[in-house]
Amino acid sequence: MRIIIVGGVAGGMSAAARLRRLNETAEIIILEKGNYVSFANCGLPYYLGGEISDKAQLVVKTPAELQRRFNLDIRLNHEVVGLDPAVQEVTVKSAQETKKMHYDRLLLAPGAHPIVPRFSGVDLTHSQFTLRGIPDLEKIMTNLQQPAIKKIAVIGGGAIGLEITEALLKQKYQVALLEAQSQLLTPFDPEMSVLLAQELEKHGVKLHLNAKVAAIQTDNDLILADQTQVAADAIIFALGVRPDTACFTAAGLKSAKDGSLLVDENYQTSVPNVYAVGDAILTTNQLTGKLQPFRLASPANRQGRQAADAMLGYKRKNRGNIGTSIVRIFGLGAAQTGLNEKQLHQLKRPFNCLHLRGSSHVAYFPGAQPLSLKLLFEPDTGKILGAQAVGNGGENAARRIDILATAIKAGMTVNDLPELELSYSPPFGAAKDPVNLAGYAAQNLLEGLSENIQWHELSKYQKAGAYLIDVREPQEIITNGAYPQAHNIPVDQLRERLNELPADKLLITACQSGQRSYLAERILRNHGFRVKNLDGGWLTYQAGTKAVFPITDKL
């Protein structure tokens, strides 16, 4: 049996290794249009920034090593330019020839290619780049060594754009980061992503949000739609990717509008004996039931293994994805999983939201790092819909989001979170981990022991007559900032000053992080007042009001 795999990175190579482990006699041919296979695409920005010093470390396995270990026939610089499913042949172009090759099973793992904008002045031969593979990296590093290149514009505020920006800042370039949307990292909600924007600005980036590029001048300076000019000696486009599937859709394989191939639960395309994985396909969002792309390394590797099983008769079901990711920006790690608040609004799906402030481990042990955690869940069932975390320290955010991603995949609800038994020792965590605490806070909302409002709702409640009580200490307000039209009664004085509060108005309690204001809410509720808690406190309110994001809510 001859199995041909198109694409030798992530999903393709994962499939090839699995196929050989399952079948020693099959002929396995990998056709890779580039000159590298099995390389660490995700590591490219870190080599650019100098954290990875040896480029050879980016190559996980060489073709020779893969041939010896797995008996794979790897053909570099071989591009598949055609497919004829009727006779089970692919057309392959190399430097020497163009020929047809028969297959018994075909796996398509062609990946995706970077989006290059079409506005005036785009010229990838003139100090303008994309970063997708090692040849792109080599080109960028060679060109950036020119003494004349000091100012670099990065266009695109997604994960790759942020990682490239961090790398360039570490190499002491002057960097302008341009994003057409009103926030960075659109998988996050604005009050969370603004923390990353602040971290970048702290390290010297010139950040331009709502920045739509209209044209690039001959010297690489950019003209924005509002006529703002941004000086640049070089430009790196980080606008995302599109599936590299043109020749396969031309052959009749069913696809979405963007060219993503449609596959069944066993990764088979619309034609027999042809499978597809990775950036080239759509899979089901397990939280919405809708097809969408998940162009991430972990799903691609998992899919490659599962497709290999399916090709040989082991029916591994493609269960879909929830979209878990993480990005690091200097001292901050930002991780997310599932749906965000913007998506839930668009889906018109009811949800509860809570913000929690925690730390990497107990405060009394040296080195504790702060963590901001956001949890979204169904208001009736407690089903977890999504989570976001931003924290100082390497594993701070990652650990909590990995736990919550596992909980979502397992179908848990917020009622299960307090029951999670997580490893604890003072250097590593707390007896009540932030994930446990989020579960407790969510239970309070589900059971009516607390009602909260979000940072973007405060002004509307105040306009409707609500009475805002800031329960922080006076010095905290002086140091950190004051809520608009707030009345200060420290939480420890609240019981003695109940007579100062209007009994006929809705009271809103607020503090620095939301914890003391919850205590104040319980005190006041137990004394017969109508009360809501400002979720996340001043830290979330301040971050949210700094973020540019229009939200419309009705009281």
Image (cartoon, grey):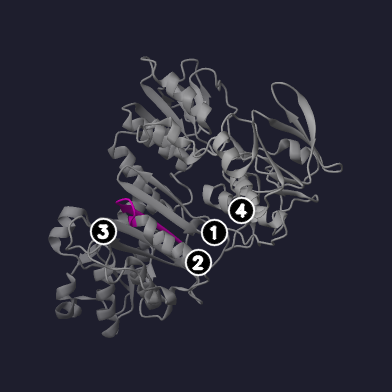
**Magenta residues, as a range?**
387-396
Label 3 vs label 2, nearer the camera: 2
Label 1 vs label 3, nearer the camera: 1
Q: Which residue is mark 3?
A: 483
Q: Is residue 394 magenta?
A: yes
Indicate the secondary structure of the residue bearing disc 4: helix
Instruction: Of the two numbered discs 3 and 2 on the same chain, state the one appearing first in sequence.
Output: 2
Report if residue 125 is visible in the image. yes
Report the disc number at residue 408.
2
Label 4 vs label 2, nearer the camera: 4
Indicate the secondary structure of the residue bearing disc 3: loop
Instruction: Of the two numbered discs 4 and 2 on the same chain, state the one appearing first in sequence.
Output: 4
Query: Would you identify the image quadrant in which residue 313 lies?
Result: bottom right
Q: Are marks 3 and 2 in contact (CB under 8 Å)?
A: no
Q: Give the residue at x 39% y 15%.
A: 146
Q: Which residue is mark 4?
A: 305
Report the disc number at residue 322.
1
Residue 101 x %, y %:
79, 35
Residue 220 x %, y %:
47, 19
For the residues labelled 4 and 2, the Cα–Cα distance comes to 22 Å
Q: Are marks 4 and 3 in contact (CB under 8 Å)?
A: no
Mark 1 Cα shell of 10 Å, populated few (<14), some (14-19), many (≥20)? many
**What secondary structure do most residues of the magenta stretch adopt?**
strand
Q: Amino acid at mark 3?
A: Tyr
The answer to whether residue 337 is above or below residue 3 is: below
Q: In this view, which residue lies farthest toward the right?
A: 86
